[in-house]
Amino acid sequence: MNMTTGVETLLDRVDVEAVADALADQGWVVLPALLPLDQVRELRKQAQAQWDAGEFHAAGIGRGQELNVNESIRTDQVQWLERAASGALADYQHFIEDLRQNLNRLLYLGLFEFEAHFAVYPPGAFYKRHLDNFRGTSARLVTAVLYLNEDWRESDCGQLRFYTDGSDGGEYIDIFPHAGTLVLFRSARFWHEVMPARRERFSMTGWLRERGNTF
Ligand code: OGA
Ligand code: MN
């Protein structure tokens, strides 16, 4: 609850201790419909406007000086986000900040900051099997993927194929990119891939990072 306005916040919609336990024990958790539809729509509209204006660019592997565009690995397009002052993006960023502090308090993770981008996968686009933090080479500790697609059907494909046993292949679950669903996982532990979709697929991917490394 926001103490000044009495309005429900995103944090009220989450059992933070259960999320922390899941991240500590199994290393990942899926929160279906975390974001209310009006907030999903606002974020989608913002991403859509930037997409329509041609502001996205081919996604790289890494960031900054390490940026490396490799179309055999991923063919999505991204737009990095700045801190928002108000609206759905600001609400989401506040939620992530609350989550960051709670995870540090409960799990001593040393999460220091959050970086995020919108991503669009045009029909047929993919991101092959990868780790977000390969052998601890980046500061990314926890990945947060939020989906912005209303009326997504399993026949649209585009699922996140998430390898639950921590191996490169092996047992997996498929997570479809339904509006408002948030997936959290330990960035260095889980191989995952984005399967090609039949429709444009919008998401926001972010990482809680430790202090230090630049990418
Ligand atoms: C990523 C990623 C997953 C998804 O951006 O690193 O794996 O489902 N995204 O969009
Ligand atoms: Mn990834």
Image (cartoon, rainbow, N blue to C red):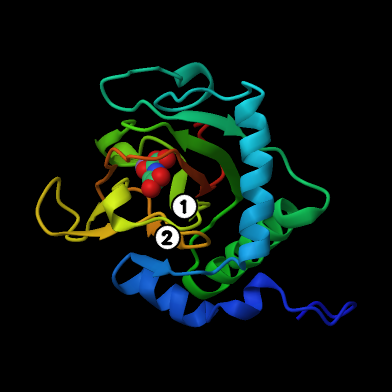
Q: Residue at x 9, y 54 (%)?
A: 170
Left or right of residue 212, residue 130 in this image: left
Q: Quadrant of the N terminus?
A: bottom right
- Expressed as whole percent of the image width and height from the top left, the position of residue 60 reads 43, 23
Q: In the depicted view, which residue is nearer to us: 145 or 43?
A: 43
Q: Quadrant of ligand 1?
A: top left
Kind of residue at badge 1: Val
Label 1's element?
strand
Q: Residue 74 lies in what quarter of the image?
A: top left
Q: In the depicted view, which residue is nearer to us: 51 or 181?
A: 51
Is the residue under label 1 in contact with that under label 2 (CB below 8 Å)?
yes
- Expressed as whole percent of the image width and height from the top left, the position of residue 47 reads 62, 39
Mark closest to the chain's N terminus, 2 or 1: 1
- Expressed as whole percent of the image width and height from the top left, the position of residue 23 reads 38, 68
Left or right of residue 59, residue 192 in this image: left
Label 2's element?
strand
Q: Residue at x 45, y 74 (%)?
A: 19
Q: In the depicted view, which residue is nearer to us: 6 or 51?
A: 51
Kind of residue at badge 2: Val
Query: Around disc 2, counting alpha carbons within 10 Å, would you say few (fewer than 14), some (14 to 19), or many (20 or more)?
Result: many
Ligand 1 is within 8 Å of the C-beta of the residue at disc 2? yes
Q: Residue at x 50, y 26 (%)?
A: 63
Left or right of residue 192, residue 168 in this image: left
Q: Residue at x 55, y 66 (%)?
A: 104
Q: Residue 164 lies in what quarter of the image?
A: bottom left
Query: Around disc 1, counting alpha carbons within 10 Å, would you say few (fewer than 14), some (14 to 19), or many (20 or more)?
Result: many
Q: Is residue 91 visible?
A: yes
Per the image, the residue denoted by label 2 is 183
Ligand 1 is within 8 Å of the C-beta of the residue at disc 1? yes
Question: Could you give the CA–CA distance between mark 2 and mark 1, rounded to whole angstroms?
Answer: 5 Å
**Furthest residue to the left?**
170
Per the image, the residue denoted by label 1 is 145
